[in-house]
Amino acid sequence: MGLSSSSARAESEAPFAVLRSESELSTENGLYRFLRYESAAREEAFAIVMGDLAGSDPAFVRVHSECLTGEVFSSLKCDCRDQLEQAMLLIAERGRGAVVYLRQEGRGIGLGNKIRAYALQARGADTIEANHELGFPTDLREFDLAAAILRDLGATSVILHTNNPEKVQALEENGIAVVSRAPAYGTVNQHNRDYLETKHRELGHDLGTLLALGGRKPDAP
């Protein structure tokens, strides 16, 4: 059966990702494929992949936005590094899955503006208020490129490792079926609790259980 006019139009308008380079990546969690993609607008993104994502079984996937402060400099102001490391470990345990890594620092405002936002937070603004004071919306990120990368990798359905309902919605709107969501638990500390509470309260991120446990992961003894 052919596509309806609306489906054909959606397919023709769907973003695409061009694979530019690929290599193996040896990590403490095993061997991955490391792929660099570009969008039509030359936006860069990466995929760290283990196993074959094609087929009827949903692949375990995390769509992750870059966080230099947390992932490289070990900032305690967020839980990004914890979530990324957790995703890599869970993929290795399954032997199949991917992290799609998007260059969208600071919910899309960039590293320089993220530093400015941190300064405002030190004076009492929360993470959303700081963005607004700088003239930015709450979240500038887009996830259509992530969906295009997943399609290129052969993934049509996923188990999505996220607390963010907007990621689920964005992938589904771009043709990737999210069959279930796997919570992404980070460590709660005195430096990031307000940030996590704001994401839970204002952005709908599913962090209630973790916050209620006072920073212990739900699977902790």
Image (cartoon, rainbow, N blue to C red):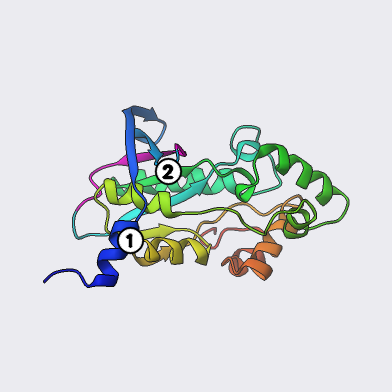
> How far across and down, in percent of the image, does residue 100 sit?
42, 45
Sequence-first tag of 2 and 1:
2
In the drawing, does residue 149 fall left or right of residue 164?
left
Q: Residues within 10 Å of mark 2 (few under 14, many from 20)?
A: many
> How far across and down, in percent of the image, does residue 41 sit?
45, 41
Which residue is depicted at the point 49% across and 48% down?
64
Looking at the picture, does residue 177 appear above or below residue 24?
A: below
At mark 2, the secondary structure is: helix
Assign the N terminus to one quadrant of the image.
bottom left
Circle number at residue 145? none
Circle number at residue 88? 2
Identify residue for label 1: 176
Q: Is residue 138 visible?
A: yes
Front of the two marks 2 and 1? 1
Distance from disc 2 to disc 1, alpha carbons, whole Å, reads: 21 Å
- Count the labels in the image: 2
**Which region shows up in magenta?**
42-54
> How far across and down, in percent of the image, does residue 200 sit?
64, 67
Q: Residue furthest left?
A: 1
Quarter of image, res 171: bottom left
Which residue is depicted at the point 27% across and 68% down?
7
Q: Is residue 33 visible?
A: no
Q: Please tell me which residue lies in front, 97 or 154.
A: 154
In the drawing, does residue 81 fall left or right of residue 95?
right
At mark 1, the secondary structure is: loop
Q: Type of residue at label 1?
A: Ile
Q: Please tell me which residue lies in front, 103 or 95.
A: 103
Q: Type of residue at label 2?
A: Met
Quarter of image, res 50: top left
> How far across and down, in percent of the image, does residue 112 sit?
71, 37
